[in-house]
Amino acid sequence: MYPEDLKYTAEHEWVRSPGEAEGSLRVGITDFAQEQLGDIVYVQLPAVGDEVTGGETCGELESTKSVSDLYAPVSGRVVARNEQLDATPEKINSDPYGEGWMIEIVPADPNAFDGLLSADEYRAQVEG
Amino acid sequence: MSVTTHEDEVTSGSNEEPDVPEELARTALYERHVELGAKFAAFGGWEMPLQYQGIVDEHNAVRGEVGLFDVSHLGKVSIIGPGARAFVDSCLTNSLDKIEAGEAQYTLCCDESGGVVDDMIVYLRSDEELMLVPNAANSDEVVRRLTEAAPEGVDVRDHQRRYGILALQGPNSDAVLAALWIPVGHDYMSFVDAHFHEIPITVCRTGYTGERGYELIIPWDDVHVLWDALIAAGEPQGVVPCGLGARDTLRTEMGYPLHGQDLSKEISPFQGRAGWAVALSKPSFWGRDALAREKESGPARRLRGIQALDRAIPRPGMTVTAGNSGTGTVTSGTFSPTLRQGIGLALLPSEVSEGDQVTVDIRGRSESFEVVRPPFVKSSPS
């Protein structure tokens, strides 16, 4: 449910280091988040080249019944976005940690990853 | 990630709920829903399954195969006694002269100003016996109004927990019932009484999905027997348990109004696409004078279908701008699983017509929609 090799945010994003692009972190939403949202039908992601600020909104996820903001887990520059999600947003539901990834960010602070939540810390948050 | 839910969208009459809701009621199938992993939501005072596996899959099962819904939260009201039929005809908007015993009809309970207290199906058993199925949130109010008006000898009785209702909807629904020797194939909007083993059931060719299907009225304590039998018999037909989330996307694709959103005390039948169920030919019924005046002058606003021209989903309460004609409001909106597009119903100034382009303010973005005539998908319940 919450892979040990990932880091997490309180806003239900996961972060993988490294991403595919050089020096980047890959970002998606957790299994808990996709389960809460239900069938995701539209995804709005920042464009490649956008600067994002950690803890601030950088996109939007819309499901049949709800809308939610996507928060940037760290500050930095967007270097990749998952273009597949425009046509097949349901990949976020079926494979949130794999094909359902969303963006890659080159963090402004190279140590930003270390400051995020561990799998155990995140699990404690969502499972109370 | 902060989630803004739109569950009010499927909660009929939610705006009439008190701020601190009483404890939610549960149907006889609550444990079944828990075992199936349902997510629950409040609907008119009831804790009902919103979805099991997912709204889109459940929706598609009903359009393509068959789905089973627990809609036991709906009201069940019997009206029995000499002159029962004439009494109901003198209160509700549609004309019972259009149907015969054994048939059902969509009708409205209006107030004197022509506002809609509730919409419902009336089942005509005989001149002395009818059954109403109003919305859960409004059942008490409908019972109250009818009881107050009932003549001597006509008994209005609330059977909320005496019966449960299952809706089996989809092109394979006949095959599922036939496998259980339950009668099928009667006309759309008609009903027959039958037995499943010793259990008396009423099999109605009605529904709220736009697909061929049935609604079964079953004694409350026996609903689980029918649920289990339908799930088992439906397996070869691809039956899927469906929540009220899919019921809402299915009805929205058909443009069927939902009371509390698209019809209300503030939204009259002529505004809300339900004028066809108002029989002004009848000498009197609740709200007749006000409705006759509105029909004469023409409603100031009308409920229209809107379909996204881009990737946008309208939600209830959003503002619609219709060029020089003014503004309106989205009353229902969802992602259409069939069209894979945003669709909705919106109250728009009467000057707006089909084919016009309007914009909807979606969280600060101006998104383009086309005004269309529902249904949004080609489907027929008959």
Image: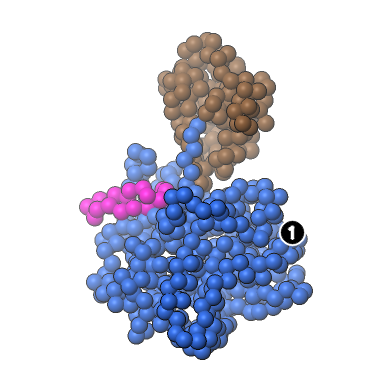
Taking the image as drawn, is residue B215 in sight?
yes
The type of residue carrying mark 1 is Glu
Residue B282 percent across, percent down from the top left: 37, 84
Quarter of the image where one finds residue A19: top right
Q: Secondary structure at mark 1?
A: helix
Residue A6 percent across, percent down from the top left: 63, 21
Quarter of the image where one finds residue B145: bottom left
What chain is the brown one?
A
Q: Residue furthest bottom?
A: B82
- Specify the color scheme: by chain
The stretch of residues the image draws in magenta is B314-330
B153 drawn magenta: no
Residue with the mark numbered 1: B235
Q: Residue at x 47, y 47 (%)?
A: B6
Which quadrant, please, contains the N terminus of chain A?
top right
Q: Give the number of callouts.
A: 1
Q: Colour of chain B?
A: blue
Question: Mark 1: few, some, or many residues within 10 Å (few <14, many ≥20)?
Answer: few
Residue B358 percent across, percent down from the top left: 32, 50
Q: Residue at x 57, y 43 (%)?
A: A38
Q: Is residue A27 left or right of residue B30?
A: left
Q: Nearer the viewer, residue B18 or B278?
A: B18
Q: Nearer the viewer, residue A103 or A73?
A: A73
Q: Residue at x 60, y 53 (%)?
A: B49
Taking the image as drawn, is residue B230 in sight?
no
Residue B348 percent across, percent down from the top left: 31, 57
Q: Is residue A117 left or right of residue A46?
A: right
Q: Is residue A80 left or right of residue B323?
A: right
Q: Residue furthest left?
A: B324
**Rendered view: B191 above or below B326:** below
Which quadrant, please, contains the C terminus of chain A?
top right
Q: Residue at x 37, y 52 (%)?
A: B330
